[in-house]
Image (cartoon, rainbow, N blue to C red):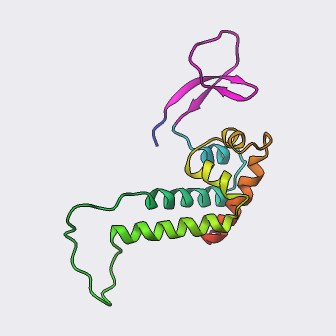
Amino acid sequence: MPQTLVERELTTEGPRRGAGERRGRRSATVNLGESPLTWLHARGHLSDRQLDAGERLRADWERALLAPSVTMSWNPVRHKGGGGDLTPGERQLAAKARFDAAVARAGPGLADVLWRVACAGESLPVAEKALAWPVRSGKLVLRLALDRVAEFYRLG
């Protein structure tokens, strides 16, 4: 993943995104290419298992959203009992089914923050604000959701 480093002013709500330099203010360098899950993991807020669960969920979400091929498929014809790989459409449907089952396993109270952070790439403060949750409440809920998703994916 490429690094896109940007200097951001630190405020009580987190890094300020506005342009314009202010002297004498505290700032931090932010990697815009880093996902919220890897950010939380790097700072010890998520376990390896939770990070893996979130990354698998995001991968299934991305695979499920891929458009099916609209051109001729030159793959060999499959026949009953022949085994072999799934077609792109079948892989997309399988990913969608896994994603739906994993989110259902997380549960209705946890799925919102899980999707926003793991799939949509929102930071926890942004997700908390969008869900009208108290500040710093999302981390606990996200961890519970990721634990349930890790159970679904049978991660050690």
- Name the residue rendered at 50%, 61% in the picture: 60
Q: Using the rendered view, name the quadrant where residue 72 is placed.
A: bottom left
Eyeballing the image, is 143 above or below 6? below
Q: Which residues are magenta?
A: 4-32
Q: Nearer the viewer, residue 123 or 128?
A: 128
Q: Nearer the viewer, residue 60 or 109?
A: 109
- Name the residue rendered at 66%, 48% in the picture: 41
State the quadrant of the C terminus. bottom right
Q: How many marks?
A: 0
Q: Is residue 29 magenta?
A: yes
Measuring from the top left, give residue 20's x and y in whole percent. Answer: 58, 13
Measuring from the top left, give residue 56's x and y in whole percent. Answer: 55, 61
Q: Is residue 20 left or right of residue 131?
A: left
Q: Using the rendered view, name the quadrant where residue 79 is placed.
A: bottom left
Q: Is residue 17 left or right of residue 142?
A: left
Q: Is residue 2 left or right of residue 155?
A: left
